[in-house]
Image: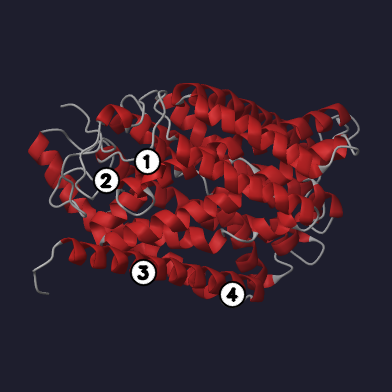
Amino acid sequence: MSTPTPERPAATASRAPSGPSVPSDAPSDGTATDPSADHLGRGLRTRHLTMMGLGSAIGAGLFLGSGVGIATAGPAVLVSYAIAGVVVILVMRMLAEMASARPASGSFSVYAEEALGPWAGFLLGWLYWFMLVMVLGAEITGAAQIVTGWYPDVPQWGVALAVVVVFAVINLWGVRQFGELEFWFAFVKVAAIVGFLVVGVLLVLGLLPGTEPVGTSNLLGHGGFAPEGWSGIAAGLLVVVFAFGGIEIVTIAAAEAREPRTAVARATRSIVWRILVFYLGSVAIMVLVLPWDSPLLAESPFVAVLDLAGLQGAARLMEVVVVVALLSAFNANVYGTSRMAYSLAGRGDGPRALRRVSRRDVPWVSVLVSVFFALVAVGLNWLLPEALLGILLNAVGAALLVVWVLVAVSQLRLRRRIEEQARASGEPMTLRMWGYPWLTWAVLVGLAALAVLMLTDDAARAQLVSTAGLVLVILAVYAATRGVQARRAAGAVPGQDG
C-alpha cells in the first residue's frame, strides 16, 4: 500500500476529515491547483529524523538552561527532569502512534483538528508556531553571547544577523541537504555529550589525576537536596519543559521522509531514551561535582565541570560544541516553524502565500517568514543584549504543556479510527501507545497536577497566566477569521436565506 501524501492539494477538500481517512494539509477552499507547484519533497531518512529530534532537543535547554534550572531548584532539579522526562516519553509515544499511521506536515495540529474540530487545529498550530519563534530567539541569543565572548569587538547583533542569513540559505537549499547537515550537527553534539559523561563519571569517582571521589557533599549539602522545596521543583519544571521541547519535530518531518510510517516509529523509539539519559546524566554530574549555588554552574555548567577536571582545552572545545548545538537547534526550529505554517495555510488557517513551494520542494515563503521573526530576535539582541536570553527561556514552558494536553486528548479520540484504518488496509499499526487508554489518562492527570503545582510558585503562575492569555488571543483570532469567511461565503451565494 502506498503512503498517502497529505500535502498535495486536492480539487475538493473538506474542513475536517471524516472516518479513518488520512488527515490532509491540503487547501480547504476547494480551489484546484497544480500539485507539482505545491507539495513537499521526500528526502529525509530515518537517521535524519533521529538526529533531527536529538538536535532540536539538545540546545539551549541543556547547555544553558540546565544551569538556570539548578540555580532555581538546587539538586532537586533532577526530580524536575525525571518527571518531565517520563511525561515527554509518554506524550511522544502517543504522537508517534498517530504520526506513523497518518504522516502530515502539520502533525499534532492536524490530529487535533480531526479529533476535536477546526478550532483545536488552529489553536495548536499557531500556539506551537509562536513557541518555536520564541525558541528561535533563545537559540540565536545564546550562540551570539558565546561568540561575542570570544571576540568582544564583534557586536552581539552582528553575530545573530550572520547566523540568520546562513541558516536561511540552508533551509531554502532543499530538505535532503537540510537533513544531512542537521545529521552531522547533531552528531557533533551527541559525541560531545557522551564525552562529557565519560569525563564526569571519572571525575565523580576520583579517577582523574589529582582528583578524589566527590561523595555527596554537594548533592546533599548547601541546604539539602531540595533547598527551595516543592516551589523550587515547580519553578524548575518550566526550564525542564522547555529543555525537552523539540523532540516532536520528528513527527512534523515525517511527512517529508521516504518511508514516513516506519521512519517515525524507529526514530521515536531511539530518541526519547537517549534524551532522558543525556539530560539526567549530565545534570547529575553537575550537581555532584559542584555546589548547586555556584555561579559557575549558572554561567556555563558544562564548561565549569570540565574546568574542574583540569581539562581547560576540552572546556574551550565544549564552548564550540555549545555554539554548534545552539545553531543546530536554531536550524531545526526554522524548519519546524516553516512546515507548521505551510500546513496551517493548506488547511485555510493562514495566508495562502505560505503554501508556495520552490523548485526544490521547499515552502520558501514559510521559511522566509520564520527568518523574518528571527531577524526580530536580532533586533532584540541589539536592544536587550543582556536580558533577552532569560526572558525567552521562561516564555515557552507553559505553552508546551498546552500542546501536550491536546496531543493526549487527540490520541484518546483518534485511536479507534486508526485501528479501523489499519484493519481496513490489512496493515498492522506500526507503533502503539502503551497501556491505552489508562496511561493516556494518567498523563492528563499528571499534566493537570503539574499545572496546579505551578500555581504555587509566583514565576510559574505568571507563565501559566500569560499562556492562558495567549490561548485566548489565538482563539479570538480564530473566531474573527471564521466570521469573516462566513460573511464572504454568504455574500458569494446571493438569494439564499440563513
Q: Would residue 131 appear left or right of 193 to someone viewing this image?
A: left
N-term-proximal mark, 1 vs 4: 1
Residue at 56% x, 76% y is: 455
Q: Compute the Cα span from label 1 to label 4.
A: 37 Å
Look at mark 4 in the image and give the residue it sits on: 461
- Residue 63, given in percent of the width and then of the height, sits at 69, 43
Residue 333 in percent (x, y) is at: 54, 41
Q: Please, what is the three-letter code of the amino acid marked with disc 1? A: Arg
**Circle 2: residue type:** Pro
Question: Quick one: label 2, few (<14), some, or many (20+) residues within 10 Å?
Answer: many
Q: Which residue is mark 1?
A: 355
**Residue 386: percent from the left, percent from the top?**
81, 55
Q: Residues within 10 Å of mark 1 (few under 14, many from 20)?
A: many
Mark 3 neighbour class, 10 Å CA radius: few under 14, some 14 to 19, many 20 or more: few
* Mark sitting on residue 27: 2
Q: Earlier in the sequence, mark 3 or mark 4?
A: 4
Residue 384, percent from left and from top: 78, 57
Q: Residue at x 36, y 58 (%)?
A: 122
Q: Secondary structure at mark 2?
A: loop
The residue positioned 79% from the left and 28% from the top of the image is 317
Above or below 117: residue 8: above
Position of the C terminus by quadrant: bottom left
For label 3, the residue is: 480
Of circles 4 and 2, which is in front? Answer: 2
Helix or strand or loop: what does disc 1 sit on? helix
